[in-house]
Image (cartoon, helix red, strand yellow):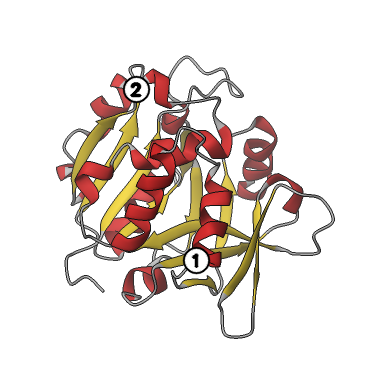
Amino acid sequence: MSDLPPIGLVPAAGSGLRLGLPYPKELYPIIRDGRYKPVAQHVVENMVTTGIEHIVFVINETKHQLIGFFGDGRRFDCRISYVYQDRERRGTGGSAGLAEALDSAHHLLGDQRVVFGMADTIMSPENCLQPLVDDRASDVHLGLFPTDTPHLVGVVDRDADGNVKRIVDKQPDSGLRDMWGVIAWGPRFTQHLHARVADTAAPDFATILNEAVDGDLSVRATALPGASYTDVGTWEEIEKLEQRQR
């Protein structure tokens, strides 16, 4: 268990080809109450609300507009750092690319508790990450949200005490309906992730999580009470979001 303050980690090095926008998808505008807020600001506010003071964005060479908007983080009551993920480490995207993106910030994570959230998602309520931030005992703690598309996400099988038995990634007919949407972890998982990504045959992120479950790391999952999760990474999800807002 680390007494160091937690650090936020937000991967944003994807190309955003599914949306085909002329600007980073993380800046897709969410208009509420007559005010503009880019989608990535939501996860920043989720983290700041729970007391996280330092957030790391993992970016690529096209994300200068993202840097221009968030700057050093002072406007958002936090400190923001940027890590460049080299093109060769981006793989083909998806779960494998995610593992390498997260590990790109390894040199900044140290022994701190890490809270990882996606830049193209909206989670509510704003303080929904608090149970994960408060837990300093488990090596990995997954925050769960209900899903009606389990074949498109990573769903979690857990026992009655919240101990994870298996991550089932994008598989049909699993019968599971709780997806992980955010993860907090400690230094032992940081090192586990780093070692597995360094392997020349590095597995995808779901496999790395399952290896932690099968190993000697404590991996828990909590269904975040009253929380909702929206992925703004596809036009289909954006349309659903706009319908709910209307």
Q: What residue type is labelled 1?
A: Gly
- Element class at badge 2: loop
Sequence order check, earlier mark of 2 and 1: 2
Residue 239 visible (yes or no): yes
10 Å neighbourhood of mark 2: few (<14), some, or many (≥20)? some
Percent of width and height locating residue 62: 36, 17
Q: Dots 2 and 1: beta carbons under 8 Å?
A: no
- Residue at x 71%, y 45% (from the top left corner): 152
Q: What is the quadrant of residue 53 in the picture? A: bottom left
**Mark on residue 215?**
1
127 up-or-down from 28: above or below: below
- Residue at x 55%, y 25% (from the top left corner): 92
Percent of width and height locating residue 90: 45, 26
Residue that mark 2 sits on: 86
10 Å neighbourhood of mark 1: few (<14), some, or many (≥20)? few
Q: What is the quadrant of residue 190 in the picture? A: bottom left
199 up-or-down from 230: above or below: above
For the N terminus, the image quarter is bottom left
Percent of width and height locating residue 93: 54, 29
- Residue at x 32%, y 28% (from the top left corner): 66
Residue 36 visible (yes or no): no
